[in-house]
Image (spheres, helix red, strand yellow):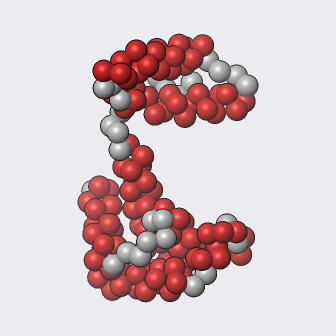
Amino acid sequence: MTTGRLEPGSGDAIAAIREFVEQAARGDVDLRLIKFLAGRWRAYLDNAADGMSEGQAFGYASDWWATEQRAKYAAAVKSLADEHFSEFAPRERSIRIEQRLQRYLRGRWKRDQRIGMPSIYEGTVDEHLFRIAQLAGGAEKSARTIQRTLSRSQAVER
């Protein structure tokens, strides 16, 4: 089991839920995991009427998914920049990424979001653009936003 110590507020609630889903899909769920999750759900059900949220019961922030989504978006933008635009200065790189992303969003994204990523995109700039568009919900991002995203990801690496 990858979740380690399971206890309320340990920060492992999301990992425990994911582990449970994986184990359940395999048909092999660890009893400790079942007891942990059952205890957290029991706490929630017993206290929801008094205002307890699921996040409080499981010990995670209510916007954990948004934080994860931002991290995935930043990683996708950084990957695109590193793999296909590394020869440009930071500002120029952001402008070029913005231009490519806007062109993609205004054109092929409309089709791709319905049918999924075409296999021909694999290993290309288009694969990165598809992933970024997916993570951004199809929203256009300014060059400044892209530059801030890249700056933050570089600061984290240092």
Q: Where is residue 134 drawn, in percent x and y?
A: 53, 65
Left or right side of 55 for 158: left
Residue beneath the point at 43% across and 28% down? 13
Residue beneath the point at 30% across and 26% down? 51
Q: Where is residue 81 drawn, in percent x and y?
A: 43, 74
Residue beneath the point at 35% across and 44% down? 63
Tag count in the figure? 0
Left or right side of 114 for 139: left
Q: Where is residue 60 drawn, in percent x and y?
A: 35, 33
Residue beneath the point at 55% across and 34% down? 18
Q: Where is residue 103 drawn, in percent x and y?
A: 50, 86
Q: Name the foreground residue: 105 vs 147.
A: 105
Q: Name the foreground residue: 1 vs 70.
A: 70
Q: Name the foreground residue: 52 vs 70.
A: 52
Q: Name the foreground residue: 135 vs 86.
A: 135
Q: Quadrant of the N terminus?
A: top right
